[in-house]
């Protein structure tokens, strides 16, 4: 068992090295100014597809994508924008999630103080809006108009 775990760790290290080598080779090709536009686009697409969640993209690739946001070609700009969005999503801090039931939130009698603490303010707004949302959802009607298509409207009894 320990030998298998050790082999898997070695494979992971080798795979990470191959990944970094592939990314660096693509970047070397992209830095070559004599590369035809078609291959430039294909290499940029391939580099964008190499984004991984478990391994961060090398800084040179991040620099390439940030510089490509203002590229002459619109396709490279689109790929660079989506790649930078993926990189930012990858770098986003993980948040600790707390499981709560909405019924428990509504039953709390929380009155916000003068400092408007965010969590208590949210709970107070939730308690205030829950009956209004429930009333609106109970009164939904579907109406069809020839010029607008199908509209969903709430019948308010005010």
Image: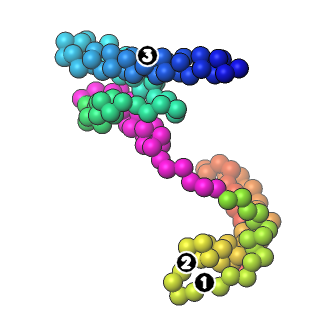
Q: Quadrant of the N terminus?
A: top right
* In-image side of 109 versus 23 (left or right): right
Can you tell which quarter of the image residue 138 is in?
bottom right
Q: Which of marks 3 and 2 is in front?
A: 3
Q: Which of 131 and 65 is in front in this view?
A: 65
> In front here: 133 or 155?
133
Location of residue 36 with respect to 57 vertically, above or below: above
Residue at 62% across, 76% down: 120
On the image, the x and y values in percent for residue 77 come to 33, 32
Q: Is residue 77 magenta?
A: yes
Dominant SS in magenta: helix
Q: What stretch is highlighted in magenta?
A: 72-97
Q: Can residue 58 be seen in this view?
A: yes
Distance from Cα at disc 1 to Cα at disc 2? 7 Å
Please name the residue that numbered disc 3 is placed on.
18
Q: In this view, does 154 lie above or below 120?
A: above
Sequence-wise first label, 3 or 2: 3
Badge 3 local density, few (<14 within 10 Å), some, or many (20+)? Answer: few
- Kindly identify which residue carries mark 1: 112
Residue ID for mark 2: 117
Up/down of 82 relative to 114, above or below: above
Q: How crowded is mark 2: few (under 14 residues within 10 Å), some or many (20 or more)?
A: few
Q: Do the residues labelled 1 and 2 touch (CB within 8 Å)?
A: yes
- The location of residue 72, given as percent across then percent down, is 24, 29
How far, Cα to Cα, is label 1 from label 3? 55 Å
List the single residue furthest toward the left: 33
């Amino acid at each position: 068992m320990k030998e298998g775990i050790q082999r898997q760790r070695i494979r992971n290290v080798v795979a990470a090295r191959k990944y970094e080598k592939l990314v660096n080779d693509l970047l070397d090709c992209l830095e070559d100014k004599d590369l035809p536009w078609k291959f430039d686009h294909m290499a940029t697409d391939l580099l964008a597809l190499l984004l991984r969640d478990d391994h961060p993209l090398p800084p040179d690739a991040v620099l390439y994508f940030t510089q490509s946001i203002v590229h002459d070609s619109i396709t490279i700009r689109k790929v660079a924008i989506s790649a930078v969005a993926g990189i930012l999503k990858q770098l986003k801090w993980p948040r600790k999630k707390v499981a709560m039931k909405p019924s428990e939130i509504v039953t709390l009698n929380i009155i916000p103080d003068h400092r408007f603490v965010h969590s208590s303010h949210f709970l107070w707004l939730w308690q205030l809006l829950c009956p209004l949302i429930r009333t609106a959802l109970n009164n939904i009607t579907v109406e069809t108009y020839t010029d607008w298509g199908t509209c969903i409207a709430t019948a308010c009894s005010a």
